[in-house]
Image: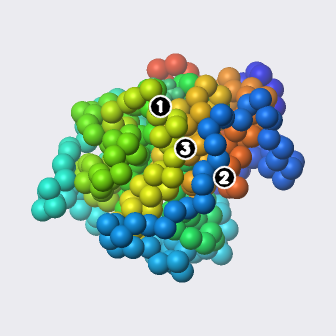
Amino acid sequence: MRNAPVTPHRVPGESLIERAAKVYDFGEQLRARRPIPDLLPEAAPAAPPPPVEERYAPVLADDAPAFMPPPGFDQDAPVARTVRPAAGAPEFVAPRADGNRVEAIDRARLAQMGMIVPGAPIGSLAEEFRLIKRQLLLTAGKMSGVRARTILVGSARPGDGKTWSAINLALSIAAERDTEVLLVDADFAKPDVMVKLGLDDGPGLLDALADPDLDPEALVVRTDVPHLSLLPVGAKSHGDTELLASRRTGEVLDRLLAADPRRLILFDTPPALAASPASVLALHVGQVMLVVRADRTTESEVRRAVQLLDGCDEIQLVLNSVSFVPGGNRFGSYYGQGE
Ligand SMILES: Nc1ncnc2c1ncn2[C@@H]1O[C@H](COP(=O)(O)OP(=O)(O)OP(=O)(O)O)[C@@H](O)[C@H]1O
Ligand SMILES: [Mg+2]
């Protein structure tokens, strides 16, 4: 990898993940993973998954089936094939009777930030995220166990586009007819998900981790985007990483997964090189989507981030801002919203 901006050649239909893999040769890195002791987080590795406590219903069966990709995903089809949008999906959902908050996402704000706008005509940005989504869903479909339905969105450094990508990916997955997506803000230092969606923060992940009697599902925020819900970061404390490293994290995750068998959980995380939560969370998830900012992330930074997130076996790279112009609204150098 070079320090200078890189502009990978684009083959039509090729996803950003595939382009990233070509630009950054991580094959060797990912095959022979060697932890760097001084970079590993201090937090202890996660304990074996605890039995799900009785108070949580429904209880996960030991032989819980692998995540099934939604209809329309042909697992054997070449990756370059794009997926048709779910036609006729309703734009707004009625408030639920279960008492959870239902919040209206600020579409104008999304448009302003150059992000996917639910209900807007499918633009090229949405197409890019379809390809990324497809790759992630296919990988999830090949994995066994409920944790296949969890994806961590991370990056090496601040400002690489983790939150931007996590929200776009969540919106893209939410457009699937038969998949629910829960976007969890796990960036304890700089929680940004709710702000970017124009919503107020509230109780969330950290509260659920801190209080074993709190049902995390009760903190989930429904949105007026069909199939999309959110879990804010919650109240911060001094021992957030230790909380995350505790066995309670596995319980919370299993509870959120058990609440809806169609649910896929995305985690927005802090920069892997700057804070330890991402590497701790990586031990729990099925896949990591590592956002690489093409115009400034160095090779050594990406390699160190991969090593820190090594607790997860499936690390996919996404090349962001191949040709990033400040103030521009492009994901890669080829598309902009609505083009
Ligand atoms: N491809 C892109 N096109 C346009 N704007 C982008 C793109 N990627 C990121 N941005 C913008 O760059 C800024 C930083 O992105 P973002 O907040 O997602 O980064 P981050 O990795 O989550 O940062 P942090 O580590 O501080 O949480 C934001 O203003 C975001 O809207
Ligand atoms: Mg962020």
Residue 180 location in percent, x, y? 37, 62
| 19 up-or-down from 296: above or below | below
Occupied quadrant, residue 22: top right
Q: Secondary structure at mark 2?
A: loop
Question: In front here: 162 or 33?
Answer: 33
| 290 up-or-down from 133: above or below | above
Q: Which residue is mark 3?
A: 245
Residue 73 location in percent, x, y? 53, 71
The residue lying at 60 percent from left, 60 percent from top is 48
The reply to whether residue 11 is visible in this rendering is yes
Under mark 1, the amino acid is Gly
Q: Which residue is mark 2?
A: 312
Q: Is residue 114 left or right of residue 310?
A: left
Under mark 2, the amino acid is Cys
Q: Which residue is mark 1?
A: 239
Residue mark closest to the camera, 3 vs 2: 3
Under mark 3, the amino acid is Ala
The reply to whether residue 224 is visible in this rendering is no
Q: CA distance from mark 1 to mark 3?
A: 10 Å
Q: Residues within 10 Å of mark 3 (few under 14, many from 20)?
A: many
Residue 44 location in percent, x, y? 64, 43
The residue lying at 65 percent from left, 75 percent from top is 76
